[in-house]
């Protein structure tokens, strides 16, 4: 299986090239082995959302070319120290500015994400780390920051552009945190969260889709936040208890484009329990017009 970055080209003369790896970390088995599987089941929505935000950023930077590489460690191979060294050397040879984003880190993946990020720092590669665990667990953030890893707190809609700009200008900060947007209650206090009504939608990647059993299945998050306060759940603290939705018409257009461009005949909504029915009602008239994609809802 070729590496996800097998087809990347070098920088064009007179242009800045940012090579942005979005790595979804795997996790360790009980004996320390990094989990690997031949095929996946459901594409990771965080990777495609971040790719969409990065593409939107690049579209507003006429002087910059962007290469975004989605790398799901579980499927695409372990990002070992040898691989990290190869990323660094190839970026240098291609005249690209390199950034590793360790994305969507959940608690079960934290140990693997931490080691991967530290190995990047040992190799002298800039790395940023974000996700539910990073956002909700301050001791993990403090540890990473103390070792030169940039931490991203909260959703990336209002922070990724600044992070990428800072990195290109050699001024990557230790921490990026949502500051503007809406105020939302959590189980502990209040946090700032982005309004996602008109935010960029996920960017699909044809190679990435082919790493799954059903390569015509895509995902889209139609709403974030949850008003409930289940004690075991991090959603209320990371995304807040104010439910925020995407514009249904834009979601339907996105589904149609996913079908036209990638043959995505099935779409898995990621939404929150109280909004699933409402989102369905708001989307369904337009959804019927964009057949044949079939929709399932995960809430
Ligand atoms: S997302 Fe589900 S589990 Fe989490 S707080 Fe809301 S209802 Fe409870």
Image (tube, rainbow, N blue to C red):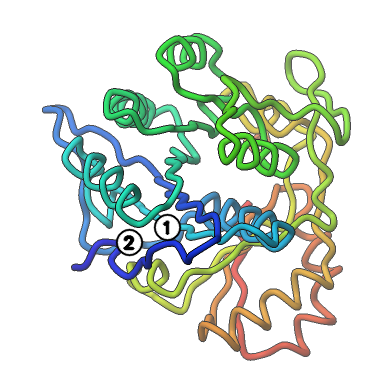
Foreground residue among 116 and 131: 116
Quadrant the N terminus occupies: bottom left
Q: Residue at x 38, y 63 (%)?
A: 10
Image quadrant of residue 212?
Answer: bottom left
Residue under label 2, please give it.
5
Whether residue 23 is visible: yes
The answer, for residue 233, to whether it is visible in the render is no
Is residue 82 shown above or below 267? Answer: above
Q: Are marks 2 and 1 in contact (CB under 8 Å)?
A: yes
Indicate yes or no: mark 1 CB to ligand 1 under 8 Å: no
Circle nearer the N terminus (2, 1): 2
Residue hosting label 1: 69
Q: Decide if residue 109 is on the left or right side of residue 244.
A: left
Residue 269 vs residue 111: left or right? right
Q: Residue at x 59, y 65 (%)?
A: 203
Residue at the image position 48 percent from the left and 73 percent from the top: 217
In terms of secondary structure, where does tag 1 sit? strand
Considering every residue shown, the one lying at the far left of the view is 31
Q: Distance between the Cα atoms at labels 2 and 1? A: 6 Å
Crowd rating for badge 1 (residues with CA inside 10 Å; few <14, some 14–19, many 20+): many
The spot of residue 194 in percent (x, y) is 80, 40
Q: Secondary structure at mark 2?
A: loop
Left or right side of 256 for 279: right
């Amino acid at each position: 299986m070729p590496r996800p970055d097998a087809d990347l080209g070098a920088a064009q003369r007179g242009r800045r090239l940012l090579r942005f790896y979005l790595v979804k970390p795997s996790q360790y088995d009980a004996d320390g082995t990094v989990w690997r599987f031949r095929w996946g089941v459901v594409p990771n929505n965080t990777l495609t959302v971040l790719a969409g935000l990065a593409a939107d950023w690049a579209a507003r930077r006429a002087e910059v070319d962007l290469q975004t590489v989605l790398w799901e460690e579980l499927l695409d191979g372990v990002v070992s120290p040898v691989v990290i060294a190869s990323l660094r050397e190839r970026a240098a040879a291609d005249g690209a500015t390199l950034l590793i984003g360790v994305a969507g880190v959940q608690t079960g993946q934290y140990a693997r994400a931490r080691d991967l990020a530290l190995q990047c720092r040992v190799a002298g590669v800039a790395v940023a780390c974000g996700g539910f665990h990073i956002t909700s667990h301050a001791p993990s953030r403090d540890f990473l920051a103390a070792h030169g890893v940039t931490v991203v707190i909260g959703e990336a809609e209002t922070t990724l552009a600044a992070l990428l700009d800072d990195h290109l200008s050699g001024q990557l900060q230790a921490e990026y945190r949502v500051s503007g947007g809406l105020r939302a209650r959590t189980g502990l206090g209040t946090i700032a969260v982005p309004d996602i009504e008109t935010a960029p939608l996920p960017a699909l990647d044809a190679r990435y889709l082919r790493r799954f059993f059903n390569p015509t299945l895509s995902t889209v998050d139609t709403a974030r936040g949850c008003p409930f306060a289940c004690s075991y759940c991090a959603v209320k603290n990371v995304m807040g208890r104010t439910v925020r939705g995407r514009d249904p018409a834009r979601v339907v257009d996105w589904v149609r484009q996913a079908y036209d461009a990638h043959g995505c005949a099935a779409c898995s909504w990621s939404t929150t329990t109280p909004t699933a029915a409402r989102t369905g009602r708001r989307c369904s008239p337009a959804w019927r017009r964009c057949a044949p994609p079939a929709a399932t809802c995960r809430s």
